[in-house]
Amino acid sequence: MKILILPDAEAAADRVAGLIAARLRQAPATVLGLATGGTMEAVYARLIAAHRAGTLSFARARSFNLDEYVGVAPDHPCSYWRYMREQLFDHVDMAPGACLLPRGDAADPAAEAAGYEAAIAAAGGIGLQLLGLGANGHIGFNEPTSSLSSLTRIKTLTPSTRAANARFFDRPEDVPRMAITMGIGTILNADEVLLLAYGEGKAAAAAAMIEGPLSASCPASALQMHRKAVVVLDEAAASRLTLRDYFDCVHPGGREAEI
Ligand code: GLP
C-alpha cells in the first residue's frame, strides 16, 4: 500500500483528482470504477474543473460505479445514479451509455448483480478503482464480515451505515436496507485502487485498514492484498496511524518517493 498523507481535505482531494486525471491522460480509454459519498464530491468538482479548462477528457473512458440501493430507481432523487449525474456525468464528456451503475430497481436484484459483474469482466475489468471508506471500514457497501473474495451481490446495510447516509434522505427511515455492491473480490481485481478518506471520523477505520490484521471485520483491510493500492489521507484521518513516521519518511508531505 502506498500511503500519502496530505495536510488537509482540500489537498487530499487535489491529489486524488490529479492521480485520476494523470491516468486518463496517459490511458484515455481507462475503465474507471467510481464511488459516491460526500468524500468524492470535492474530487469530482476538480475533475469537472479540469474538463472545463480543456485539460481533461472522458470521451474514451467507461465507468462502473461501486454500488446502488436496492429498490431505488435511477430517477429517484437519492439514487446513486442521480448523485453521479449531478456530481460528474452531466458536466463532462463521457459517451452516452459509457457509465454504468447497478439497477437498484431491477426485478431480480440477484440477477442484476451477477449481470453487473459479468459486464465488468466483458469490459476487460476495472483499470482504476476509486474508493471512499466507511467509518466502520466498509468499501463500496461491503460491510464488516463480508467475504474477502466476494463478487457483486446484495448486502444488508448496518444500522451505522444507514445512519451515516441518512443525511442524503428526507427521513432516516427512508434509507434503504439493502444495496447491490461490487464485492471485495471485484475491487481487488481492479488493476489499481485509489482510496480517499479524510476527517477524524475515518481515523480508526484508516488505521485498521492500513495497520490492522487482514480481517473481514475491516473490509478495507483487504486492500493489503492488492498489488497497487494508493491510500490518500488528510492529517485527521491519519491521526491514529502508529507507523506515521515511516509513511512521512517514504512520502514526505504526501509526495512521491525519491529514489
Ligand atoms: C457510503 C458508500 C461508500 C462510501 C462510504 C463513505 O456508504 N457506499 O462507497 O465510500 O460510504 O461515505 P462518505 O464519503 O459520505 O463518508
Image: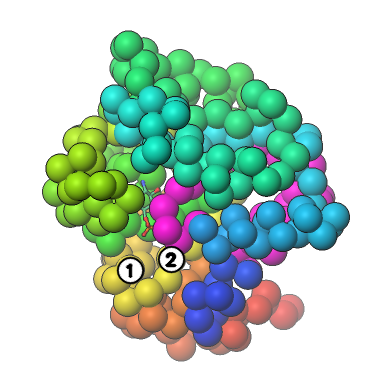
The residue closer to the viewer here, 44 or 223, is: 44
Q: Is mark 2 within 8 Å of ligand 1?
A: yes
Measuring 23% from the left and 41% from the top, which residue is drawn there? 175
Mark 1 closeness class: few <14, some 14–19, many ≥20 residues within 10 Å:
many
Residue 56 located left or right of residue 167 = right
Asked if residue 145 is positioned above or below residue 95 in the image, the reply reads below
Q: Is mark 1 within 8 Å of ligand 1?
A: yes
In this view, which residue lies farthest toward the front? 170
- How far apart, in angstroms, are the residues tagged by discs 1 and 2? 7 Å
The first of marks 1 and 2 along the sequence is 2
| Residue 184 seen in render | no
Measuring 29% from the left and 25% from the top, which residue is drawn there? 71
- Identify the secondary structure beneath mark 2: strand
Asked whether disc 1 touches disc 2, contact meaning CB atoms under 8 Å apart, the reply is yes
Measuring 71% from the left and 44% from the top, which residue is drawn there? 92
Residue 32 location in percent, x, y? 62, 41
Measuring 38% from the left and 44% from the top, which residue is drawn there? 140
Residue 8 located left or right of residue 55 = left
> Which segment did they paint magenta?
15-40
The residue closer to the viewer here, 5 or 185, is: 5
Q: Amino acid at mark 2?
A: Ala
Q: Which mark is residue 202?
A: 1
Q: Which mark is residue 197?
A: 2
